[in-house]
Amino acid sequence: MEYAFALRNVNYRYNKKQPNVLNDISFNVKTGTIFGLLGPSGAGKSTTQKVMIKLLNDFEGEILYFGKALKHYNQSFYEEIGVGFEMPVLFNKLTAMENLSFFASLYKREIDYEALLIRVGLGEAKNQQVGQYSKGMKVRLNFVRALVNDPKVVFLDEPTNGLDPTNARIIKDIILELKAAGKTIFISTHLMGDVEELCDEVAFIAEGKVLEIYEGTTYPSALNSLILDGITFEAFYPSIRIQGDQPNMTMIELFNLSLSAIVIGTDTDTFAALESIDISNVSATSIQIGQRATSFPVLTELTVNFTTILGDLRIGDESSTFPLLEELYITNSNFANLKIGRFNDEFAILNLIYLENITLSGELIIASIVAPELAIIVLNDITASSLSISPTLAITETYVVYIDNLVLSSTLYFNSSCNHIYLVESDVTTWAYYAAVNALGIAMSNGTYVVI
């Protein structure tokens, strides 16, 4: 396999007194393919491109261009590459044609750039001063400028950013045509849609580090793990959705994140190798783990800690299965609603549900789960509107509920399988429970119990 570029342990810093902007970057760009570098603003995408096009030379590590060290290339290197920067590099007082004529004069080869200008919808504005162009028009002209010398390798930084769907479609079609003609294209972007549609291979970069490299059309199944730590997503990718069968993924760790929604599994997805899910210090609008018959056949660890959710945390929904999950821990968090189970979700060996230091503006519901081994539910320091342990629970063995410092503004509701309830130092407005509840133990401040 021939590589247009090969990066080996590349590090770069703009100032020796500051930390690295790039940290041990390594990846290969196969000849004749579209390679994507995906990440949020400030992740290191543009800096990576700049060291690859020799704008930044004092880097550590090694970069090979078609097998030869990049530092050994002279000015002839620029005859073979075309670069479309994120910020258009154009002369505002020149027309589009004058701009392209000037840039083409810098190279030995040139294409019919007027035809390409017409192709991107700028034919009627070709003799108009660029200073009068809109942002989208400048983006399209900048794209044409990157191709004037018929480059062997094309670098495109956010090539469709700021374009309407029609013009973005034209740009993407041209990129695919360049690939079909044997060109190598390197795209840096924050737009997941562009990556999924265009790229043969993708590297995910954050804080100057490449976290994963995967095939662009099947990247979710190729992941062995997903570990995200300390990334703010609002301006780059508003949600994380891990969908489709995941045969290789063994763990998901989401730490110190701010984003919109997290969805792990939907519509009969199977996470065949996933053993653990750990979510900590995350701010989100909603989190859904398992939905519409999602299967987690080997999941043994599921924890949520120090997390704030404006909406719901839902675990299980509509016949999802967790056959090896023994214990569920959710602690030190704030939600609107917490819902465990909905419509016959199966927890074959679940024996402990442990919830501690949780504030809910709405409901805490444990409902409609098949959990034959469930032995104890522990609720420590819980504030909510209502707590409902539903009568639709399919539990063959009786279980015990231990509650310490529960504050409810509305109803506390238990189903008939509950054997003992121990309530310590709590404030509950309304009780509702089935007659089959064997004992309701209320621990008063002096430590004695009243059995009802």
Image (tube, helix red, strand yellow):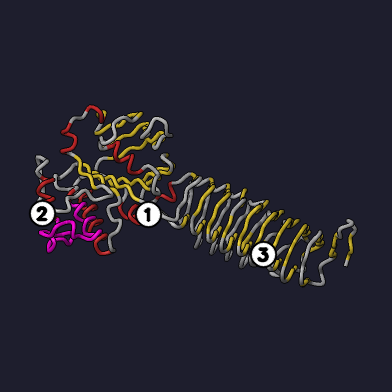
Q: Residues within 10 Å of mark 3 (few under 14, many from 20)?
A: many
| 215 sits left or right of 232 in the view | left
Q: Nearer the viewer, residue 424 or 401?
A: 424
Badge 3 vs badge 2, beta-carbon distance below 8 Å: no
Q: Amino acid at mark 3?
A: Leu
Secondary structure, mark 2, is helix
Residue 259 drawn above or below residue 203: below
Q: According to the image, label 1 marks what residue? A: 192
The residues bearing labels 3 and 2 have C-alpha atoms spaced at a distance of 65 Å
Residue that lies at the very extreme toward the front in this rendered image: 93
Secondary structure, mark 1, is helix
| 361 sits left or right of 4 in the view | right
Q: Which residue occupies 11% across, 45% down? A: 104
Q: Which residue occupies 89% across, 64% down? A: 451
Q: Amino acid at mark 1?
A: Met
Q: Which residue occupies 62% across, 58% down? A: 334
Percent x, y of residue 118: 13, 60
Q: Quadrant of residue 448?
A: bottom right
Q: Earlier in the sequence, mark 2 or mark 1?
A: 2
The residues bearing labels 2 and 1 have C-alpha atoms spaced at a distance of 33 Å
Residue 119 drawn above or below residue 69: below
Q: According to the image, label 2 marks what residue? A: 97
The magenta segment is 117-144
Q: According to the image, label 3 marks what residue? A: 364
Q: Earlier in the sequence, mark 1 or mark 3?
A: 1
Q: Quadrant of the C terminus?
A: bottom right
The nearer-to-camera label among 2 and 1 is 2
Percent x, y of residue 279: 57, 50
Q: Quadrant of residue 17?
A: top left
Residue 292 drawn above or below residue 253: below
Percent x, y of residue 152: 19, 41
Q: Amino acid at mark 2?
A: Met
